Amino acid sequence: MATYRIAVLPGDGVGQEVIPEAVKVLGAVARGAGVVTFEFEPGLIGGAAIDATGDPLPDATLSLCRESHAILFGAVGGPKWDNAPQEKRAERGLLGVRKELDLYANLRPARCFPMLVDASPLKRSIVEGVDIMVVRELTGGLYYGEPRGMEKMADGGRRAINTMTYTSREIERVARVGFDVARKRRKKLASVDKANVLVVSQLWRQVVSEVAREFPDVTLQHVLVDNCAMALVAHPAQFDTIVTENTFGDILSDEAAILAGSMGMLPSASLGETAALYEPVHGTAPDIAGQGTANPIAAILSAAMLLRHSAGMGRDAERVETAVLRVLEKGYRTADIHQDGTTRVGTAQMGDLIVREINMLYS
Ligand code: NAD
């Protein structure tokens, strides 16, 4: 029996409500599959860690993350900590984990569930059948490039600088993740760049084309970022897997998120060579925190990604996804996706319903 150690970091706000539901789901999978044991180790991060220790990322949490097979993370931040100095802000906790563990590939699926098509602001004919995976490079490019900063100029004006920089190694490793993911899906990869203008993008395109030779079964297409932004809202169903650099990925993955209807439905994974973090895309939702109404599906689908990418349990991940679909098909909805004619349920009830379906899928 394999044992996986999972660091459980709920963080703040609704993170503390949705992560217990994801843990419940992983427990049900372990019982149903009968081939793994999950050891859940809780840790403090974000505002909760500031309140307890004064530090958004205590050493004990970082050590726990390093010693675990995977990290299940909720969300951090909220009005209580908004005025803290930069290095003591709750968000530092998450940024610190990403940086320390070199989590360089961010995977964000955007899937339009058939029964939620009308929750999307786009027309049914556009979003129907959409199932996209955006792979975003997470540790390079404009966000970290040097030199950076702001300076006074001789004429009294000011100048600000950020540097977009990528090495071929950085591009190669994330491209490989992109091809790998595409290979497990519909074998179509769109690499997004701005090679008609940016030198960095020209290197990006060269390196991605070189890596493509290792994946002859995956069809590669190079797409300019401006075209991609248009196509994502005009013909999103044409995309399967998208791989792109940090800044383009930040913007395009949020654009793709609109296709899925609600923030409460979107999971994500951040992968490194030796570590992996799974988290819902949404934040701490202070407007609904503490009410037991948050949608736990994003967190539960993040747990499914953990099964697929960290535990090698792809079939079990599919069971979790099927269980979510079945509960939605039966008409159960949390407040954020509730419509007339459906049954409104709270966070824990939604988790229980999904666990019940999972149990049935294993019986
Ligand atoms: P948010 O994602 O927390 O909320 C945006 C909207 O989506 C709100 O109306 C909220 O009620 C709704 N929502 C979010 N999650 C939901 C869920 N599970 N179920 C139902 N509805 C849900 O974004 P925000 O309001 O911009 O940020 C709030 C706080 O969260 C801020 O402090 C921000 O810094 C932090 N934040 C953290 C992360 C993270 O930890 N990864 C990400 C984004 C925002």
Image (cartoon, rainbow, N blue to C red):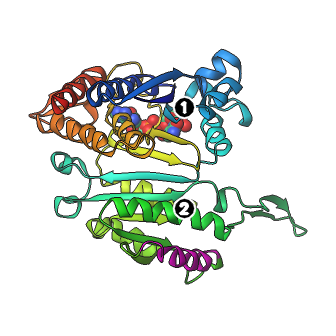
Q: Which image quarter has ligand 1? A: top left
Q: Quadrant of residue 26?
A: top left
For the residue labelled by badge 1, is the local secondary structure a helix, a strand or a loop? loop
Residue nearest the observer in this picture, 152 or 20:
20
Q: Position of residue 335 (x, y in %)?
A: 26, 30
Q: Is residue 167 visible?
A: yes
Which residue is most to the front?
1
Magenta range: 200-215
Residue marked by disc 2? 174
Which residue is most to the right?
154
- Which sits earlier in the primary sequence, circle 2 or circle 1? 1
User: Where 176 falls versus 196 (above or below)?
Assistant: above
Identity, as a three-letter code, of the amino acid under mark 1: Val
Query: Can you tell me whether the CB of the residue at mark 1 lies under 8 Å from the nearest atom of ligand 1?
Result: yes
Q: Which residue is at a point 33% across and 68% down the rendered structure image?
A: 187
Residue nearest the observer in this picture, 287 or 102:
102
Residue marked by disc 1? 76
User: Where 342 falls versus 95 (above or below)?
Assistant: above
Estimate the spatial distance between the alpha carbons at disc 2 and disc 1, rounded to whole Å: 26 Å
Residue nearest the observer in this picture, 240 or 144:
240
